[in-house]
Image (cartoon, helix red, strand yellow):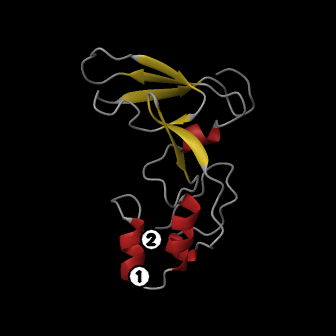
């Protein structure tokens, strides 16, 4: 599904339709120039320059017990954390801490081997993410 949506977006020539397909936000638009994610092979800096070849989707931790697929490309990720992507490595464990808002019946700290969503604790307030390993595989 993600690859199909990527091909549809990159093939669209009408800029108004491309903007609608892209679902622009305050931080991401089809013509906004962005830096590639650390370790990415991305060369074009805006979606207007993107080719039809979709980057390989990766599994990520959307919510505490919900896994989803994303395209690891900074042109389409809204407010991603370059620091977390820079420390992405085999064996990485992320510690996700609930730190804003009141604690409820759910967990206050989670551990995940997947890249966590910035709003991992949706509905429970914000959270912070700490990678356990540096990009070279040594503990932080």
Tell me the quarter of the image containing the N terminus.
bottom right
The image quarter containing residue 62 is top left
| Residue 37 position in % (x across, y down) | 60, 52
- Residue at 64% from the left image edge and 36% from the top image edge: 87
Horizontally, is 66 left or right of 23 in the view? right
Q: Residue 6 carries which label?
A: none
Query: Can you say whether 51 is above or below 62 in the image?
Result: below
| Residue 68 position in % (x across, y down) | 50, 43
Query: Can you say whether 63 is above or below 100 in the image?
Result: below
Query: Can you say whether 92 is above or below 56 in the image?
Result: above
The residue pinned by badge 2 equals: 30
- The count of marks equals 2
- Residue at 24% from the left image edge and 18% from the top image edge: 102
Of 119 and 82, the residue lying toward us: 119
> Dot 2, crowdedness within 10 Å: few (<14), some or many (≥20)?
many
* Cα–Cα span, label 2 and label 1: 9 Å
The residue pinned by badge 1 equals: 15
Query: Which type of secondary structure does the marked residue at label 2 adopt?
Result: loop
Is mark 2 in CB contact (under 8 Å) with mark 1?
yes
| Residue 9 position in % (x across, y down) | 50, 72
């Amino acid at each position: 599904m993600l690859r199909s949506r990527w091909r549809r977006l990159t093939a669209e020539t009408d800029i108004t339709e491309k903007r609608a397909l892209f679902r622009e936000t305050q931080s991401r638009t089809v013509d906004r120039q962005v830096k590639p994610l650390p370790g990415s092979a991305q060369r074009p800096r805006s979606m207007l320059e993107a080719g039809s070849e979709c980057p390989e989707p990766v599994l990520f931790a959307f919510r505490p017990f919900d896994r989803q697929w994303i395209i690891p490309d900074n042109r389409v990720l809204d407010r991603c954390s370059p620091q977390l992507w820079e420390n992405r490595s085999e064996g990485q464990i992320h510690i996700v801490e609930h730190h804003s808002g009141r604690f409820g019946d759910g967990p206050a700290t989670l551990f995940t081997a997947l890249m966590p969503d910035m709003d991992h604790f949706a509905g429970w307030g914000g959270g912070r993410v700490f990678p356990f390993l540096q990009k070279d595989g040594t503990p932080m």
